[in-house]
Image (cartoon, rainbow, N blue to C red):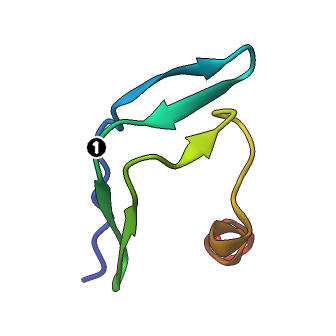
Amino acid sequence: MNKTELKRVCVKPFDKDRFEVIENYEFSLSNYKGIVPKGFKTDGASIPRLFLVFVSTL
């Protein structure tokens, strides 16, 4: 059975519209395990290109 495991990501404000990941974020989607490294910056809404593959198959 494929299992998706997600937990909360720890972030802090970086600038007006973005956040910074403050500790490595590990996740599991089906048979894929990945990590978002500490220091990664995000606006919290955009989907990184890497994950578009997963979104398009849902």
Q: Quadrant of the C terminus?
A: bottom right
Task: Using residue 5 as the reference point, say whether residue 32 is left or right of it.
Answer: right
Percent across and percent down for residue 35 are 36, 66
Percent across and percent down for residue 6 are 32, 51
Q: In this view, does 24 lie above or below 57?
A: above
Residue at left offset 71%, top offset 36%: 45
Q: In which quarter of the image is the N terminus?
A: bottom left
**Badge 1 amino acid:** Glu
Choose between 37 and 35: the one closer to the eye.
37
Mark 1 = which residue? 23
Task: Using residue 32 as the reference point, say whether residue 50 is left or right of it.
Answer: right
Could you tell me which secondary element the residue under label 1 belongs to? loop
Q: Is residue 20 above or below residue 49?
A: above
Q: Residue 31, located in which quarter of the rendered image?
A: bottom left
Residue occupying the far top of the picture: 16
Q: Is residue 2 above or below residue 51?
A: below
Q: Residue 8, located in which quarter of the rendered image?
A: top left
* Mark 1 closeness class: few <14, some 14–19, many ≥20 residues within 10 Å: some
Percent across and percent down for residue 23 are 28, 43
How many numbered badges does the structure rendering display?
Answer: 1
Residue at left offset 74%, top offset 20%: 17
Q: Residue 7, located in which quarter of the rendered image?
A: top left
Residue at left offset 72%, top offset 69%: 52
Residue at left offset 32%, top offset 62%: 27
Q: In this view, does 35 lie above or below 45?
A: below
Task: Using residue 22 as the reference point, say whether residue 46 is left or right of it.
Answer: right
Task: Using residue 42 as the reference point, say whether residue 49 is left or right of it.
Answer: right
Choose between 21 and 30: the one closer to the eye.
21
